[in-house]
Image (cartoon, grey):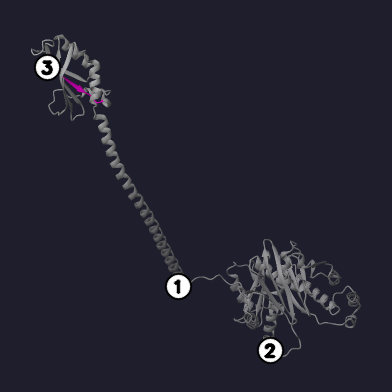
Amino acid sequence: MAQLIALEWDKSEIRLATGRRYGDSLQLDDLRSIAIPQDSDGDSSAQLTELLGELLGDQLTRGPALVNLQRGAVELRMMELPQVPADELPDMVRLQAVRHFTSLTDDWTLDFLPSTSVDSDTGRQSILAAAIHPDHIQQVQSACEAQQLTITQLALRSCSSASSWLQSTSDTTTSLLVDLLEAEADLTVIHDGQVALSRNVRLPQTSSAEQQDVGPDELALGDAVAQDEQPSSELNVPLLQSEIRRTIAAANSQLTDGSVEQLVLLGSDPALAETLGSGLELTVATFNFLDHVTFRGQAPASVERFTSLVGLIHDAALQQPPAFDFVSPRRKPHVASTREKTIRIGGWATIAVAVLIVLALFMYRNKSAQLAELQQIAAGLDAEIKSSTELNIRRQRIQDFRIRNIVWIDEILRLSESFPDSDTAIVRTMNFVNQATGYGRMSMDVNVRAAPEVSELENTLREVFTKVSGNGVKPNEDDPYYKFRSHQTLVVTPHALRETTEVEQAAPSASEDDDTPATTNED
């Protein structure tokens, strides 16, 4: 995902963290800070803008930015409200907030964090409300806009620190987080996985001699802190421990189902954590976010001060809204007016009509393309059909010719094989006729020696030809050897039709007159 930029500042320094999320892990790209001079003159806003530009540098891409607000810039109030539906809660919080915030006006930004638990006896729920003056938001926006940064989230620093710790643990113990800064500390109570109380305390820096000028109990504590294991000789440990007690007392009085059981110091100083927890009868632990994220760069001094920025980046990477977001505070769901509903319905109707028109045009173009393709195919098929028809006509002509064709030489051979020898009969004349019906007719004048030979000849020829008919036997006075003559007519069936019984039954008479002589042979 894209690189996330997180910023925050207080009176002593400006801190910046950049990172991105890879799978289930968070990778930090850079952690850096720049000190704010305390003795500088001139406009503090101009100085802040200049230092912010110097911290960002030229290599960092400008764009969306996540910003933490210091606890001192935000007013927090705990409110007890009746249990109501979630969509009615923003209006009720706004109405009741004027009773808890003395300076709240309509131009203040108000956000709230509902409690996850409800008092079963009273049916009321606790609401942690946060309000910020518009001047603070304007100052932050002006500084960021001057550096081409667009604020997408404006969160509370103590809640971001709590989120960083919650992301790395599954412990549900009610805990007090101690987040040390230059001359102040954020004390945040976490109960049921969310912030229940947050305080910011001032810690004036003191010398070792001032720490020793205290009562007997505090003197022992001061001596312990003055040892070599103390991370800073300027930390006012007795005052911080006193504020921790006050915070625990305030939290225990507000919580209806538990109390503070654990002290968590942000950082890697177990000795200081043990010192702060002495006399409190609490479990003491430390938390270093570098143990739970990927960072291969050089860790800056006081790395624990970047814990809140890491929590802010982690929430944004998970697309999880922060506890308080003064850019997008919780509001009542917008109820559309009749005019908005009409416009919305009209807009959706217009979109639907446009979609239908586009779909119709798409289908028309698609069908047109298919039709053109089919027409092209049809044109090719027409040409193929025409060529096939012509070819079929030619084939049919050839087939008809093959069926109807009579090879007369073959028929003469058949006649010769069944005809008697020349001592018995001879053929004087012969005619061949191709009839329109496909059959052939063979006519011949035959001279025989004896009259009975004609009948025998006819019987023999009937075994070979389809039909044989004669005009009887007549005397032949011109030839003393062949004394009788007869005229025979033979019906010849084409070779392709000879084995078809139906054709034989439908054979025409040999006496038909619609024939044309084909060949004449005289002996």
Mark closer to the observer (2, 3): 3
Crowdedness of circle 2 by 10 Å Cα count: few (<14), some, many (20+)? few
Residue behind mark 2? 43
The residue nearer to you, when weighing 461 against 390, is 461
Instruction: Identify the residue at image location x=82%, y=82%.
Output: 205
**Neighbours of disc 3 within 10 Å: few (<14), some (14-19), many (20+):** few
Which kind of residue does numbered mark 3 sit on? Asn
Q: For the residue marked with disc 1, what is the amino acid?
A: Arg
Name the residue at 85% across, 82% down: 206
Describe the element under mark 3 as helix, strand or loop. Answer: loop
For marks 1 and 3 on the same chain, the one whose residue lies earlier in the sequence:
1
Label ID, residue 339 = 1
Dot in front, 1 or 3: 3
In this picture, residue 45 sits left or right of residue 417: right
Gap between marks 2 and 3 measured at Cα: 149 Å
Give the mark nearest the N terminus, 2 or 1: 2
Number of callouts: 3
Residue 384 in the image: state x and y as whole percent.
33, 45
**Residue positioned most to the left:** 477
Above or below, 237 against 362 in this view is below
What is the C-alpha distance between the residues marked 1 and 3?
116 Å
Examine the structure image and report whether residue 89 is included in the region drawn in magenta.
no
Magenta stretch, main secondary structure class:
strand
Which image quadrant is residue 72 in?
Answer: bottom right
Q: Earlier in the sequence, mark 2 or mark 3?
A: 2
- Asked whether the beta carbons under mark 2 and mark 3 sit within 8 Å of each other, the answer is no
Q: Which residues are magenta?
A: 485-494
Residue at the disc numbered 3: 471
Q: Residue 125 at x, y = what percent?
A: 66, 68
Residue occupying the far bottom of the picture:
41
